[in-house]
Amino acid sequence: MGEAGNLSCKDRLLRLEHGFVRWRRPGPPPDVPLEKRCAEEEGPEKLDELSGRMREEEKWGNLPFISVPVLRAKDYRICSEHFEKDDYTDSTQRGRLKKNAIPWTKTRATTVEETDTTGVPLNESLLAGVPQSTPKKTLQRESESRSSRPGLSSCLTLLLSSPETSSVRPRTKPSLSGTYIAKPLSWRQSVVSLAMIKAFHKFPNTFAITKVCSPSSHTPTSSSGSGSGSGKEPEHERKWIVNESRLLELFNTCKTCGSAVENKRIVTHGSQIRVLWTCLNDHPGSWASCPDIRGMAENNLLISASTFFTGTTHTTISDWAELLHTPIPKKTQYYSMQSIYLIPVIQQAYRDQHEKFMERLVQLSASGHKVELCGDARSDSPGFSSKYCTYSFQDDATKEIIHFELVQVTETTSSVAMEVLGFQRGLDYLLDRGVVVGVVTTDRSPSVRKLMKDNYTGIQHEFDPWHVSKSVKKKLVLISNKKNNKDLQPWIKSITNHLYWSCSTSKGDKEDCVRRWKSLLHHICGIHRWEEDGAQYTCHHTTLTEDEQRRKRWLRPDSSAFVALKGVVLDKNLVRDLRQMSLFKHTGSLEVYHQVMLKYAEKRLHFSYDSMRARTQLAVIDHNSNVGRPQDDHGIKLYTQDRVSNGLQNPCLKTPQAFRHDLVERVLRRRDDSTVVFSDTLPPRKPGQRTLLQNIAPVPRPDKGDLVAHTKSRF
């Protein structure tokens, strides 16, 4: 500026008349003549107010919250010291000011520090003596740099220091002292004014603040998604569904210098989206929605694991994702991850749980105790066209599933023969492991009954009374529908209850169980004391009053209904089976486990052998992890009707399903293992695994020509 730089604002006002801006406010004319003096002489605050008002009228930076009071009754002038060469229409500072020219305070040399392209102060010593939480303006003042790099913007530098007075209480949280850089989220000009600083204190969330350790350690880096940022494990971190358009709004400015992004490229891998960009200053950057585990997107593995571990199928999830337009791993990639990561993890978790149970049962057998088991079969489809049969064994004391056998129909002659094969294979496995079995409770399967009678004579075989009661009830309903047997209908429920009572009160005495059951024929005729085999017997109920005895609808011994009932009660097969129900053992808990299996392996869906086995193991882990849950004493009581008693009961607590998180952690660790190689093909079958036939026909496939030659027609 030549010698004008040594003049005062007033002298410069006289010499550079054309370099002044006349700022007139609407209102009445001043009472005193205008005085040619700079607005800064009344204080830097006045100049900042004028600058803030000019920015507000020019709508600078889209900051509508900046509010500067309107000045009235005075006119102010601003000398050329507060403008630069770029603010004029020519470089001589003798022309007209540009419309977007904004004045600066004269004391900027002591309050403004030079910054590099990243906005980091070059001289940290200027922050010495700054009060606590005092904002300081940092600007890029080189005209050449601002004109050649239009994307650069300025920022605020904040110094936060902790008070050191003795009156302050001891700190309980980490100190936040340090130097911070605050950048406005939306900017157009390289300007930071006092109004902006006031706005920062009033609206702190409008600025993005980045902590700076030291100028030497601050290097431009690209933002990536390699870390969760929340301190949580990947499987526990929350995930959100975000629209792509809203997501890309976050990449309009460079994360290094704050300039506009020029080139953006989107790369997707299943559920992972990766954004690559380059700003106007040629700063590259990248960001990913989730980290990678040895080159595989972490969320792709988590989606596949969540699908399989919750019992869902890829078809169901893909339909949901397609309707929502949410990308997920494709079918081929899902089944590859299922075979290489998910199924091996489930098998290992099941093996760990199974070995704990076997160790406990072996120790129990070694101490002289016999294990009581319950067994039941479950087919993968109703009817006689099943492909798989799962026979499960349950510890009657703890209600835990200790072993199961999966049988495919190609291993037997028919689907009916799968049950006895699974039972024999599973029981032999437990006996070979050293488990001493005392009692086995099953349904009344004829093949299982014959197998137990021939091969396992040392094990007591019991039947579930529910299966027998259902059969008796079906016969009673059938005979009571006849015209002459209508009197039997009111007694059907009492007869089935009497069957349960006979089994539950016999205490293992087989003959006493049969005798109690036959006492029904005396009681139903109104006879409560009788003689049999030289001994006197009475009913176990309380003595009935004369009114109760008269109002009961007793059956006459010579009636058709009584004769039909006698044929059902004294049936030789029923009497024989009653001797195997004296211990009153049940398989109802196995039916509950089968309901859990429906969650992981629906009967209406087909699965491969490996997938069916893994899903069954998953159901076993789920059942054993949640068995024996306490009841919810604070919840609403539910009315339940079970086989033993009716009434209000407290429901059990909800299943926490904590085992799933352990499985997910195992999957991530397996993926992180460099010895496990991922491929799109199924792994080869291990040596020793059972080889299943590819067809179910018992004879070889005949030649088509021979069949055509031997075909006969009626015509």
Image (spheres, grey):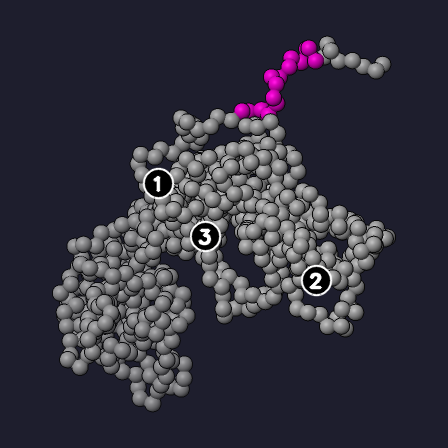
Q: Circle 1 is placed at which residue position?
A: 670
Asked which secondary structure carries label 3, the reply is: loop
Instruction: Give the tally of numbered discs.
Output: 3
The image position of residue 387, as x and y in percent, is 59, 33
Q: Is residue 571 left or right of residue 430?
A: right
- For marks 2 and 3, give the CA distance: 42 Å
The first of marks 1 and 3 along the sequence is 3
Q: Is residue 2 magenta?
A: no
Residue shown at 66%/59% (left/top)?
536
Q: Nearer the viewer, mark 1 or mark 2?
A: 2
What type is the residue that disc 1 sits on?
A: Arg
As drawn, the label of residue 529 is: 2
What type is the residue that disc 3 sits on?
A: Thr
As drawn, 549 above or below 483: below
- For marks 1 and 3, give the CA distance: 32 Å
Residue shown at 60%/46% (left/top)?
579
- For marks 1 and 2, give the CA distance: 73 Å
As drawn, 7 above or below 324: below
Residue shown at 15%/79% (left/top)?
165
The image position of residue 674, as x and y in percent, is 30, 36
